[in-house]
Structures are given as structure tokens and as C-alpha cells.
Image (cartoon, rainbow, N blue to C red):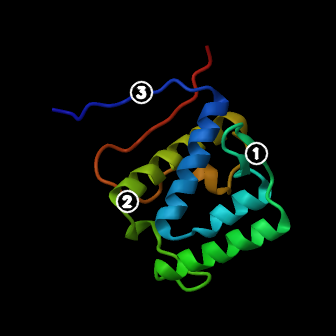
Amino acid sequence: MNAPLVRLDLSIEHAEAVASLLDLATRIHMGQVSEILSLVEAGTLPIHDDAATGSRRKATEDEAYRVEDAVVALRRALGHPSGSSFGIGHVSDEAKHGYEVMKAVRKAMHDHLRPDVRHVVDADGIIVRYAKGPVPTARIIEE
């Protein structure tokens, strides 16, 4: 008997968010925790000024430096020298599954939005399998 499958109906914006967040989670699992600093510097991961009101803002330069120090310490604690990380083949099964879902979603998005553009990573889809189970697939449906 085949394993049951889960189907999601997502808008383009939701699919982009899913792919982006899966990419981030995969990178964190690989030890690329400097991605957290990138989010802080871009303002995507804001500083919470007041938990009671929920007010948020972009980090100041000083706050970004403190986050950078914390990221360096976290990398060290995880055993990663500066500039190194695990490859996707050396992470948890959860991260491998997330990586493959991200690759499938990005390929579908690429084929829909930029079908004439080749020779870019998003056009590749899943080339090498890292996870067990059925190959994740994604497709864009025009309704």
C-alpha cells in the first residue's frame, strides 16, 4: 500500500513563504546560524520593543553587533568553525525532508514564473535524494 500523501492549496505568496522558511530551517539545521544575523540586519527579524504592546523595529547597529556575537558563540557551541557547516546529507531526517519540499516548491514556482530561464538553481528541483519516502512534488494550478 502506498503511503498517504498530504496536499496543500497555497497562493503564490504562501508558497514563496513556505519555500523561504524551509530554506531557513534547513540552513539552521546545517549549522548556518549566521542566517539569523542576516534576518536581523534586513529587519525581517525585528527587535521587540515592548512585549505588552507588540511594538517592533529594526535592530540598531549596536544590537546587530550583539546578535552577531551571539551567532558566533552559537556556531562555536555547535562545533562549526567560521565559514563552515554541514552539508544537507549530514543533517536530521526532518531537515532532509524540508530541503526536498523546498526544492520541489521552488522548481514549481520557477517553472511557472520564469519558464524560459534555465541554468539557475531553482530550475533544478530535486536532483539528489537525501530523504526516504515518496519524492515531494509541487505544481502550479491555474483556476
Residue at 71% over, 72% down: 66
Residue 11: in sight, yes or no? yes
Residue at 62% over, 19% down: 142
Residue at 34% over, 55% down: 131
Element at label 1: strand
In the picture shown, does residue 125 fall above or below 111? below
Front-most of 135 and 62?
Answer: 62
Instruction: Give the foreground label among 2 and 1.
Output: 1
Image quarter of residue 23:
bottom right
Q: Estimate the spatial distance between the alpha carbons at disc 2 and disc 3, rounded to whole Å.
A: 21 Å
- Disc 2 marks a residue whose amino acid type is Tyr
- Disc 1 marks a residue whose amino acid type is Arg
Image quarter of residue 119:
bottom right
The residue carrying mark 2 is 130
User: Where is residue 30 shown, x and y percent of the image?
Assistant: 48, 68
Q: Estimate the spatial distance between the alpha carbons at disc 3 and disc 1, rounded to whole Å.
A: 34 Å
- Disc 3 marks a residue whose amino acid type is Arg
Position of the C terminus, as image quadrant, is: top right
Q: Earlier in the sequence, mark 3 or mark 1?
A: 3
Label pair 3/1, CB-CB below 8 angstroms: no
Instruction: Give the foreground label among 3 and 1.
Output: 1
Position of the N terminus, as image quadrant, is: top left
Q: Earlier in the sequence, mark 2 or mark 3?
A: 3
In the picture shown, does residue 81 fall above or below 11? below
Q: Estimate the spatial distance between the alpha carbons at disc 2 and disc 1, rounded to whole Å.
A: 38 Å
Work out which residue is located at the far left of the displayed protein and give it: 1
Q: Earlier in the sequence, mark 2 or mark 1?
A: 1
Element at label 3: loop
The residue carrying mark 1 is 56
Label pair 2/3, CB-CB below 8 angstroms: no
